[in-house]
Image: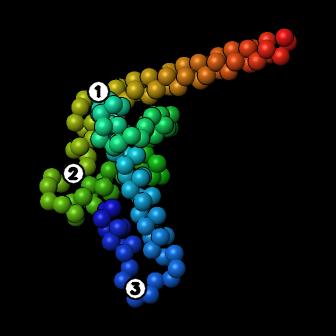
């Protein structure tokens, strides 16, 4: 899919308008960044450590992308119900590559591992707890800094 989009962005033009090549390249770069973020989230969800993710991706940190996914409830953002989305992806995958008829569905934890729905609920609760704890810790730090600043002004 990404290769098709990339190929579509490379127009054969004798005299492209000024900025066309840059616009096409930045569009492609945004697509790659989206796919990389999704890959990082998927790898982290499968247990790859942040250190290993950093090793594979370079010096970037990805905590915000992973936290955003967790805060969003680890949900499908396509607007389609999950069963319809998986059927659609299965049909697309069947057209693109030979393999099992339900290539996407068979790769989902929900169909591969009994109890995965409970595990996902546990993961959501864990992420919510970490988010709440992080917010409280940040609030406490801000209160302490504010107190120190007020004490400094009184002197």
Work out whether mark 1 precedes mark 3 in sequence or the reverse, and give the earlier one: 3
Looking at the rendered image, the disc whose residue lies closer to the viewer, 1 or 3, is: 3
Side (left or right) of 106 relative to 130: left
**Viewer-nearest residue: 72 or 32:** 32
Instruction: Tell me if label 1 and label 2 are in contact, CB under 8 Å.
Output: no
> Of the numbered discs in the image, which one, if any, rests on residue 102?
2
Residue receiving disc 1 = 115
Dot 1 surroundings within 10 Å: few (below 14), some, or many (20 or more)? few
Residue positioned 40% across, 26% down in the render? 123
> Of the numbered discs in the image, which one, if any, rests on residue 7?
none
Residue positioned 39% across, 23% down in the render? 122
Looking at the rendered image, the disc whose residue lies closer to the viewer, 2 or 3, is: 3
Work out whether mark 1 precedes mark 2 in sequence or the reverse, and give the earlier one: 2
Dot 2 surroundings within 10 Å: few (below 14), some, or many (20 or more)? some
- Is label 2 in a helix, a strand or a loop? loop
- Is label 3 in a helix, a strand or a loop? loop
Between the residue at mark 1 and the residue at mark 2, the CA separation in whole angstroms equals 20 Å
Q: Is residue 12 above or below residue 92?
A: below
Residue positioned 30% across, 55% down in the render? 89
Residue receiving disc 3 = 13
């Amino acid at each position: 899919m990404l290769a098709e989009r990339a190929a579509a962005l490379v127009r054969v033009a004798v005299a492209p308008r000024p900025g066309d090549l840059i616009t096409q390249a930045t569009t492609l770069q945004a697509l790659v960044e989206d796919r990389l973020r999704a890959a990082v989230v998927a790898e982290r969800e499968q247990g790859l450590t942040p250190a290993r993710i950093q090793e594979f991706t370079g010096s970037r940190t990805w905590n915000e992308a992973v936290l955003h996914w967790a805060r969003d409830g680890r949900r499908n953002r396509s607007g389609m119900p999950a069963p319809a989305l998986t059927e659609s992806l299965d049909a697309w995958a069947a057209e693109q590559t030979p393999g099992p008829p339900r290539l996407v569905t068979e790769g989902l934890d929900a169909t591969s591992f009994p109890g995965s729905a409970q595990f996902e609920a546990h993961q959501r609760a864990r992420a919510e707890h970490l988010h709440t704890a992080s917010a409280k810790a940040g609030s406490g730090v801000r209160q302490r800094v504010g107190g120190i600043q007020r004490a400094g002004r009184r002197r």
